[in-house]
Amino acid sequence: MNIKDTSTSIIVSDFPVPHWWKTREEYIQSYIDNEIRNGSVSLLSVSPGKRRILSVCYGDAEPELKGRANFNSALGAGNPDVFFKRGRGARERPVLVILAGIHGQEVEGMAAAFSIIHLMESGRDLEGKEQPLLLEKLKRLRLIIIPLANPDGRVRVPYDGWVGRKREEMTLYGQGTRKNGELYGWQGSKEVHPMQGDVCFLGAYFNDDGVNMMHDEWSSPMSETTKALLTIARKEGPDMLLNLHSSMHDPHFFPTPYIPVSVKMRLDNFAKRFFNVIEGYGYSHGACSLNLEDGPAGITPPAFNLSSMLYHTGVDMSLVFESPHGVMDNTNYYGYTDILRIHHTLFETAADYLTEL
């Protein structure tokens, strides 16, 4: 596919975006600025494009459980509790972080994260439905929600959702194009970083400096938002972080590389628990194990990505969740209500898991 002028390539879907599906930067920011009563709002960073990255927190922190060592040193001491006391019975409120919008075209997680903010504030989700059980479970947690981590990328995308649209259109706006109009594509977009130089359309993967935060420079982060996310990991010691992404496949998790096997086993058990629940609702899912060997002989080793770095900075269970976009090429059909329900189920499963620790 070769497209140089994105302004003339807008495609109308046979599946209109419902009025309640809100993913635009201006709407999310306006709601946070004007409607938050039950939560507390923090400015995490300002993007290269001068846009704010905000978090909304619910539930009290328990700073008295924080030790005097960073996570790495605590492991060196053989005593993780000197970083943070967490796990069974340690915390009144386990800490769950919902992180959305690292990639600006992956709007599904933005809608889901915003839906939880809406639920915590109004008692109704984004679709306008009451969710009393989900609300009750989430209120048992300290909940930190970052609904739009890359607003620079989001504002380049003219679509609010992808249901019924072509994969190539999503790829164009997601990873961008070279000067000759060729699509960079998923892995091709990672061969140049920061994404500068041979760029006709800068894809929504990147902030305005061309940084894809999933693959930042960990020894010296290029993105202020990356630094802010690592600060949350360090200061909060989250029990779980759900990094929400999307793909053209059934719901699945992307393995977190370079973490202990014991942690991979817990991630895998959590994923299987979630899959069992959505199977009951009639949804399919990916079958990839989260307990994989990192870089066996003859195989290109996986990247030490943001999910890995968040674990090594202090997140106990760092997961990348891949939602279906609902594009025409998706393995199965997913509408907007399906996508939202799958995310709500993910959050409810996480709340159950954390409060049972």
Image (spheres, rainbow, N blue to C red):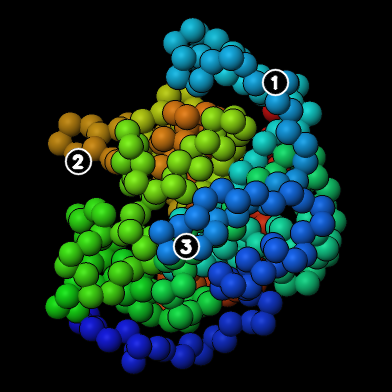
Estimate the spatial distance between the alpha carbons at disc 3 and disc 1, rounded to whole Å: 35 Å
Q: In the image, is residue 1 above or below residue 248?
A: below
Which residue is pictured at 36% across the width and 63% down the height?
208
Q: Report the amino acid beneath label 3.
A: Lys
Where does label 2 land, which residue?
Answer: 300
Identify residue type, mark 2.
Answer: Thr
Q: Where is residue 50 in the image (x, y as percent from the top left)?
A: 47, 62
Q: Please give the residue where the numbered disc 3 appears in the rendered image.
A: 50
Q: Which of marks 3 and 2 is in front?
A: 3
Alpha carbon distance from label 3 to label 2: 37 Å
Q: Name the residue under label 1.
A: 65
- 306 lies left or right of 195: right
Element class at badge 1: helix
Pair 3/1: label in front: 3
The reply to whether residue 60 is visible in this rendering is: yes
Q: Position of residue 303 (x, y in %)?
A: 29, 41
Quarter of the figure with residue 54: bottom right
Q: What residue type is labelled 1?
A: Leu
What residue appears at the point 41 percent right and 74 percent down from the top-left corner? 156
Residue density around tag 3, few if under 14, some if 14–19, many if 20 or more, within 10 Å? few
Residue mark closest to the camera, 2 vs 1: 1
Please tell me in which quadrant of the rendered image residue 27 appears: bottom right
Judge from the rendering whether residue 3 lies leftward or rightward of residue 291; answer left or right.
left
Query: Mark 3 or 1 closer to N-term?
Result: 3
> 292 or 127: which is nearer to us?
127
Q: How far apart are marks 2 and 1 (CA)?
A: 40 Å
Q: Which residue is drawn at 70% across and 20% down?
A: 65
Which comes before the other along the chain, label 2 or label 1? Answer: 1
